[in-house]
Amino acid sequence: MTAQKAPRALSKAAAAISAVAGDDLAQSGVTNAIDLGSTVTGVTVASQGTATNLAIRGVGSSQFAPLGGSAVGFIQDGVAIEGNIGLTSGFYDLERVEVMKGPQGTLYGLNATAGVISVVSAKPKVGETSGAVDGEYGNYNGYNLSGHMNVPLGDNVAARLSGTLNRHDGYVADTFNDAKEGGLRGQVLMEQERWSLLLAGDYYHEGGVGNTQTPVPLSTGRGTKGGDPFDVNYYEAVAGDAHRDDEYWGVRAELNADLGFANLTVVPGYRVINTDDIQYINAFRADLINKSSQTSIEARLDGDAGSVRWLLGGYAFWGKRTYDGFFYSTGYGPNPFGPPAPLQNSFMEGDSISANSVFSKTPKDSQAVFGQLTWSVQDDVRLVGGLRYSHDGREAKPNTSSVLKTTLPSVPPPLASFIPISQLQGIAIAPGRSLSLESLLAKDPANLFIETVSISREADFDNVDFKVGVEYDLTDRTLLYANVTSGYKSGGINAYAFGNGGLSYKQETLTAYEAGVRSRFDDVRLHLNGFYWSYKDHQEGAIYNIPGVGTQLVIENIPSGHLYGADMELEWQPTPNDNFNLSVSWLESDTGAFSIGGVVQPKGHEYASAPHWTINGSYQHTFPIGTYELIARGEGHYQSTSNLEINFLPESVQEAYFTGNLSLTLQPETADWYVSAFVRNVTDKAYLTGAVKAPGLAPDYWGNLGAPRTYGVRTGFKF
């Protein structure tokens, strides 16, 4: 476990840290960050188009904003990925995934308000020739292939090549929520007596149709065929139009050197994210082109000076992003001038539409210095202290917003951006890739015009994070600890130049108080953790319907709130053939009073994606059969009722639910091959991982569905 920037056994980690081995993730069918919530309690993940909204213990964002960041730091092999796009590309040939719950501002800085998810790839092994191939086939015409090859390149050099392919047909309307993706990762490791150097590069592509949403609450069956939430009643032309064409690639290095007085670690990285998508999310269509790149470098020195273990480091980040989005919504109808009502279907004759676009170039930079000391006051007592200073710069040059309007005398000015499709017949109801405000304008230049606003903005933010802690070895197998830590997410600039919402928003901060105990015995490992979090200026996406403009999505701040609760993790192996795991999270929260999107909310609301109870469990039994083993395994995930977005309306409530997985595996005692049958989401439970308020003139909520029941066979071998 390296979550605290130095190798350490998980049983000695004085913090709320969970680690899941790569093999266990593969067995549970976890192929990206979206599936982590069923494996680690307190973690919720929802996809919204190409974006991935992460939350830990209810701290995250329930809406995607174009220029927003994540409240959960996402680290891929030591390189922090800024923003919330491109977080699904590294989940193959993994050593482990580490989840740090609670602010990690001292060691990780930017975007670590709620914690950090660290994805650690399996590294090359010097002097070893080895490999593995795994394959899976199941319903929805789904298959997954993955493998790796490790080869020596001399006495002190090794290379490892890993790859994956993941395919399945659409879960929603036989089209949407499909998978058509794959990637490669190459690594070369050079080891000498006092230094090592790892060079790596990776590439990942996501294609297919992409994700969509279904109308909620699910119990109404609204907007579906026969009430089936996986059969959304979209207009037929949509299916052939939506697509994803997203690529993520990067290069990185890691230098480790023994300098005698200290150990040196240097991690430079460069990553590129290019997305080109047409998405149908709730009642609007989005043509999105996102091009971003980031360069980062972190350097650390750590060593011992008598009874003090010390760490000093510096971090620098430079990023740029070009965001080009064209949106048009069906609004409400069929009469846009009468009482608005949510549509059952999208993009059909008789609807009205609202069309607008956003273009922005947003350079970003961040610099930080940090340090941490651990003082062994005596053999069984340690005091920990850390500080980090961060400076972040944000720009938007230019920031351009445009909206298509009509001069038809029959359209009242407040609705001037909602245009009857009859004006645009042949374009709006049979959309094509060439859609733009200009192409819509060309359809009827006499009654349509484009209004544009362009603004350039800058903002700078400074922050100091801290950590104070104490560790006490009650016995050689029991550790007690208590910490006070802080974390922050930089403020920023809103992408839209029109109207409502602030031009910029504040940085958010969180101070956490926690205490815990870790114990390990011959057949039991136990971790208990209790916490209280004080949350200031929480960043949340806000939707405004601006008269004469249409929908604008901006980020605003919730002044203050708090969260508290406790976690338990238990691993028990009563016999060599039995293994039992149980994780339980209890959470209470209060947002305080706030106003978001022009809606005033009193205090007493819980945070979004903050269920009171989350329980994960598994039981595995091995039946010896001569020189073979038959392994039966069951897994379960329970989550109590929670609200999935910040407006706290009944439509966005996810009722309590349970999902379970079953598998049966045959393998020899040597475990060099296996054959397995599996069922995931055994009861075919329809549940939501997120929900959003759709753009338009009346309240309308749509949700992100989790995967339905899938089943199949999985096999593999290693050498």
Image: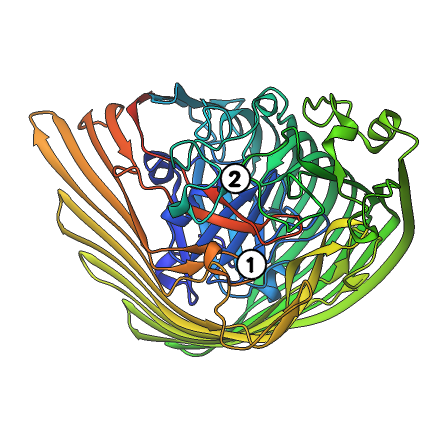
- Name the image colouring: rainbow
Could you say which quadrant of the image residue 710 lies in?
top left
Could you say which quadrant of the image residue 508 lies in?
bottom right
* Residue 695 appears left or right of 126: right
Tell me which numbered mark, 2 or 1, is placed earlier along the sequence.
1
Q: Tell me the number on the disc at residue 60.
A: 1
Label 1 residue SS: loop
Image point (73%, 63%), residue name: 491
| 628, above or below 360, in the image | above
Could one spot residue 383 in this view of the protein? no
**Mark 2 or 1: the one toward you:** 2
Q: Where is residue 509 in the image (x, y as percent from the top left)?
A: 63, 70
The type of residue carrying mark 2 is: Gln
Q: Position of residue 675 (x, y in %)?
A: 24, 22
Q: Where is residue 484 in the image (x, y as percent from the top left)?
A: 52, 77
Residue topped by disc 2: 213
Residue in the foreground of this view, choosing between 654 and 245: 654
Label 2 residue SS: loop
Could one spot residue 700 in this view of the protein? yes
| Neighbours of disc 1 within 10 Å: few (<14), some (14-19), many (20+) | many
Q: Residue furthest bottom?
A: 377
